[in-house]
Amino acid sequence: MTQLINRYLGSGDSLARLQDHAARLMRLQNVLAQHLPPALAAACSVANLKSGTLVLLADGGAVAARLKQMAPTLTAQFAATGVPVTAIQVKVKVNEAPEPARRVTSRSLSESGARSLTDFSASLPADSPLREALERLVSRSRRDEKA
């Protein structure tokens, strides 16, 4: 499977360049992880390398501040490993928290309440939207009680 994907990615000129760039970024990520404390390495990632500027993404402001402090040292360490990094730009990653799922609350009508609504809806005209809504409410309440 991997061979098929590699063959597909290597087939076109633009796809081959994309594959090379992705491989380069992975190598940079490995070099970065070697030169950072494990906790800091886990909180940042390589985003891009363009014209000698390495773009790093930080999980938060504190991580970004620490990476900016370490930028001159990191630049020298990248140069020592043969990677032509002239500047490091740090950006804070925006993590969107997923919206919590709405809790479905089960509400039921008492038998006397359902009977009262049924009696009231019977007194309404047959084509009344209120009558239809009340009948749906009573039928859902009875269906939920059985479930």
Image (cartoon, rainbow, N blue to C red):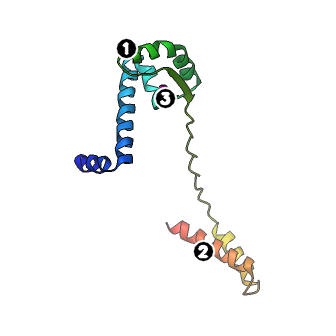
Q: Which residue is the site of mark 1?
A: 80
Q: Residue at x 26, y 49 (%)?
A: 7
In the image, residue 34 sits, relative to residue 108, either above or below, namely above
- Residue 135 percent location from the top left of the image: 66, 77
Q: Which residues are magenta?
A: 51-55
What distance separates the C-alpha of mark 2 from that of mark 1? 75 Å
Q: Dot 3 lies on which element? A: loop
Mark toward the start of the polypeptide (2 vs 3): 3
What is the three-letter code of the residue carrying label 2?
Ser
The answer to which image quadrant residue 20 occupies is top left
- Residue 119 percent location from the top left of the image: 72, 80
Say whether marks 2 and 3 touch (CB < 8 Å): no
Mark toward the start of the polypeptide (3 vs 1): 3
Q: Which mark is residue 51?
A: 3
Closer to the camera, 141 or 2?
A: 2
Q: Dot 2 lies on which element? A: helix
Closer to the camera, 12 or 3?
A: 12
What is the three-letter code of the residue carrying label 1?
Ala
The answer to which image quadrant residue 41 occupies is top left
Q: Mostly what secondary structure, the magenta segment? A: strand
Say whether marks 3 and 1 touch (CB < 8 Å): no
Residue 142 colored magenta?
Answer: no
In the image, residue 75 sits, relative to residue 114, either above or below, namely above
Relative horizontal placement of residue 114, taking residue 22 as reference (left or right): right
Q: Which residue is the site of mark 2?
A: 139
Number of numbered discs overlaid on the protein picture: 3
Closer to the camera, 30 or 37?
A: 30
